[in-house]
Amino acid sequence: MENTKPWLALYPKEIPVSIDYGGKTLVELFEEAAVEYRDKNAIHFLGKTVKFGELYEQSLKFASYLQSLGLTKGERVAIMLPNCPQAVIAFYGVLLAGGTVVETNPLYMERELEYQLNDSGAKFIISLDLLYPRISKVKALTKIEHVIITSIKDYLPFPKNLIYPFIQKKQHGITVKVEHHGSTHLLAEIMKVASANPTAVDIKQEDLALLQYTGGTTGFPKGVMLTHRNLVANSMMCSHWLYKCKKGEEKILGVLPFFHVYGLTTVLILSVLQGYEMILLPKFDPETTLKTIHKQRPTLFPGAPTIYIALLNHPNLQKYDLSSIDSCISGSAPLPVEVQEQFEEVTGGKLVEGYGLTETSPVTHANFVWEERVTGSIGVPWPNTESMIISFETGEQADIKEIGEIAVKGPQVMKGYWNQPEETDSVLKDGWFLTGDLGYMDERGYFYVVDRKKDMIIAGGFNIYPREVEEVLYEYDAIQEVVVAGVPDPYRGETVKAYVVLKEGATCTEEELNKFARTYLAAYKVPRMYEFRKELPKTAVGKILRRALVEEEKEKQKKAT
């Protein structure tokens, strides 16, 4: 496959076309940060701060304790935690011990947890006391030998640490008491007894750092194998893209979960690489997020469109000062233009759309933050990253503006899928990763995503891209969120259905929306069905689960016949 790179002519002089990654691992970069930023805050968590020196020492203790339990190089350790200091300590502790991290969603129920633990072959898991009953139910069905438990209160300042158990009981209706005994270990006890001198492990850039499971809504998730090199490269690309950000000076809001690779790379790894302070929130709550921005003054805020939409539509938005925010890269879903413009107006900062996948650590493309950006485009490939559109007709590079499958190549592309050689071979061709996304490139090298290959709607022989219909509907004032999907139709094969969440206090009828859509869309693209809902199903990172809605519709139709 050939590739030309017209986008390189667009790069400002501050962004290098190629970066030297220096052969360093995540562990080496962490060690360097611990020396350079020793007495600087690495983490702010609900009023508690942890300095880089403390973070490093506690990670060393965790590493040496894992080794004392028998962890050997390459063994998998599941981390099932929300964003909190323990999630950072565990991540680097596992790597320092020579292990491989398996990020695990704390929202997983027993069936999902059992599958991921068995698929990864993890022998160790660290999680919250609150989740201990869930882990206990599946432990015997997996290879897990040791369970390490921590509590949110362990890293809260006084008096929050004393009050928290009562809040936990009120919110979740349970109090979990876990003893430090046998194969169950308490992180608080580990920190008292473990030495900060783990056995040194020879770690190379090509070693596996992370098994990150892709959240498929159909079939079982696949473990994406990401190496030290993949993650180091992507975080370095990110730091060069944000070239105006000053080393050791920025504060980054960590509301994207670390069990999603987007949050892991753009918050956790980038912060350590650049000496930034991470302001962590255990879950996304609009009011808490607004208060945190107002009080803690973060300058960087990676997020997803649904996060920005929720903040902009919060009834108390005007009460909070968001002017500290300088730059945001939005990912995981298309960024509606109105959201981008409104958010920039409120903050005075820059919000640009980027693109990536779990398989690419995750970022491959983004708009320039401080230079020209193109509305509706995912921007241009990052340094050292090649990209092209593959034609459906020829299987070769597509013509300018011809829609085909987006393919990418670069140091951030995964090693493959864990224990799935056939799946790996189907998406990795000569170093090129086939994304499964449909898009095109313009003559200047800007890329556009029209939709997921599997989300394209074929109605009456016409190809319809949900994203195009959503962009139009987002312009209707009363709409807060919308997702468009193809649902089964006996006559057209599929038909277009829009699922709509209205802004608080707003009203709107199906007829009004239909009339609006017909003004801007060809008749065959206009939704034939509308469903008004209070909320839409989403992943932990805020991506709307279109396929879940399609499955729901199929079930409804089945019951009706």
Image (spheres, helix red, strand yellow):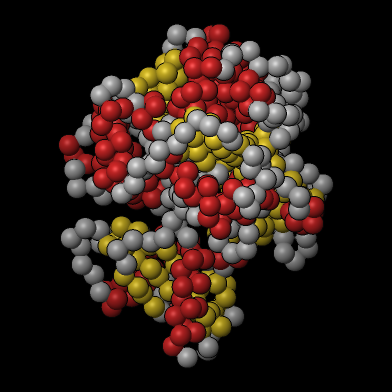
Q: Horizontal placement of 523 versus 219: left or right?
A: left
Which residue is rendered at x = 49% and y = 50% of the image? 134
Q: Position of residue 453 (x, y in %)?
A: 62, 63
Nearer to the camera, 258 or 20: 258
Which residue is rendered at x = 37% and y = 46% of the image? 307
Q: Horizontal placement of 422 versus 436: left or right?
A: right
Dividing the picture into quadrants, the one containing residue 157 is top left
Q: Position of residue 508 (x, y in %)?
A: 23, 70
Nearer to the camera, 489 or 55: 55
Residue 144 in view (yes/no): yes
Which residue is rendered at x = 38% and y = 61% of the image? 536
Q: How many badges with numbers are in the image?
A: 0
Q: Position of residue 314 (x, y in %)?
A: 24, 47
Q: Horizontal placement of 295 versus 58: left or right?
A: left
Q: Is residue 491 above or below residue 321?
A: below
Dividing the picture into quadrants, the one containing residue 78 is top right
Residue 266 in view (yes/no): no
Nearer to the camera, 405 or 224: 224
Nearer to the camera, 528 or 169: 169
Which residue is rendered at x = 45% and y = 8% of the image? 39
